[in-house]
Image: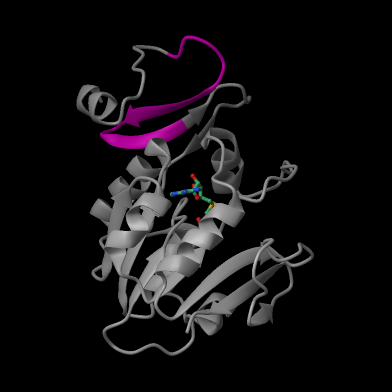
Amino acid sequence: MHQLAKEFLLPLFEQPEEPGIYLACENDRLCLLDNTKKPLMKLHLDFAHGRLGYRLKGSGSEDLLKAIGKLPDEAVILDATMGFAEDTLLLAKTGKRLIACEQDPVVFLLVREALQLSPVENLQIQYGNAIDLMPSCHADVIYLDPMFLRKIKAKEKKEIQFLQQIVGPATPAEDLLKAALDHAKMKVVVKRASKAAPISGPKPSYQIEGKSVRFDVYRVD
Ligand SMILES: C[S@@+](CC[C@H](N)C(=O)[O-])C[C@H]1O[C@@H](n2cnc3c(N)ncnc32)[C@H](O)[C@@H]1O
């Protein structure tokens, strides 16, 4: 923990000092603890079992893959807003070279550890701001899932509850889209809530509508 705290500039505590969310080490594994909840809420990120494990093995017919479409063998996909990598695991099923980046250190560390335990061959993850990393990724397709801030329901998936609370201020979606359109060679795919307007800026070339989310696809020619 000392090494991680130093490398990722995170404050280190022997014991939680006040109510809040902490990255902790339990049985040699990282986990998130929320000691404001009773009973204590814990999150271990596990890509081999449970809901996320299903995604790793699942059939891959989801709308996101439709929006990504057919790509040449050598295509590179950049998932610029990795979060807890749920969509990243789906994108990995394309078999294309995949780069995923995340700017929040705690989220990045949890995903990095989960991938060490359940490696994904064609996936490379990078820590940092996607806007700075885009020029060196040479991606054909850039995927964006900007955090849409909304009220969290008590029944919401644990990963979403934690993610909403721990990540810092999101990069404005317009800035991410502009950078992605400048750097993607083929297309940019943006996940939106189904009723949300497209990100302000250029109009999407087409949309793939789902029940609760929509994918706006921007062709780059
Ligand atoms: C809605 S979540 C993504 C969820 C993800 N698609 C999934 O399936 O788990 C958005 C994530 O993007 C990250 N993020 C926002 N702006 C970013 C940026 N400029 N560079 C890298 N990561 C960013 C946030 O820290 C957050 O973890």
The extreme left residue here reads: 3
Q: Which residue occupies 56% across, 39% down?
A: 162
The picture quadrant where one finds residue 67 is bottom right
Q: Classify the position of the N terminus by image quarter.
A: top left
Q: Is residue 208 left or right of residue 78?
A: right
Identify which residue is drawn at 52% across, 56% down: 176
Seen in the picture, residue 218 relative to 78 is either above or below; the reply is below
Q: Can residue 54 be spotted in the picture?
A: no
Left or right, 172 with reference to 154? left
Task: Examine the structure image and report whether residue 80 is included in the region drawn in magenta.
Answer: no
Residue 112 vs residue 206, the one in the foreground = 206
Task: Name the residue at 55% across, 27% down.
Answer: 40
How is colour applied across the structure in the image? one colour
- Total numbered labels placed on residues in the image: 0
**Residue 63 x %, y %:** 59, 79
Occupied quadrant, residue 149: top right
Q: Which residue lies most toward the top here?
A: 17
Q: Which quarter of the figure has residue 2? A: top left
Name the residue located 35 percent from the left edge and 71 percent from the top edge.
139
Which residues fall within the magenta stretch?
A: 16-32
- Residue 49 drawn at (x, y percent): 41, 59
Q: Is residue 121 visible?
A: yes
Say if the magenta span includes residue 23. yes
The location of residue 26, given as percent across then percent down, is: 33, 30
Residue 164 in the image, given as x and y percentages of width and height: 60, 40
Q: Which one is in front, 10 or 37?
A: 10
In the image shown, does 165 or 81 lie closer to the viewer? Answer: 81
Q: Is residue 67 above or below residue 80?
A: below
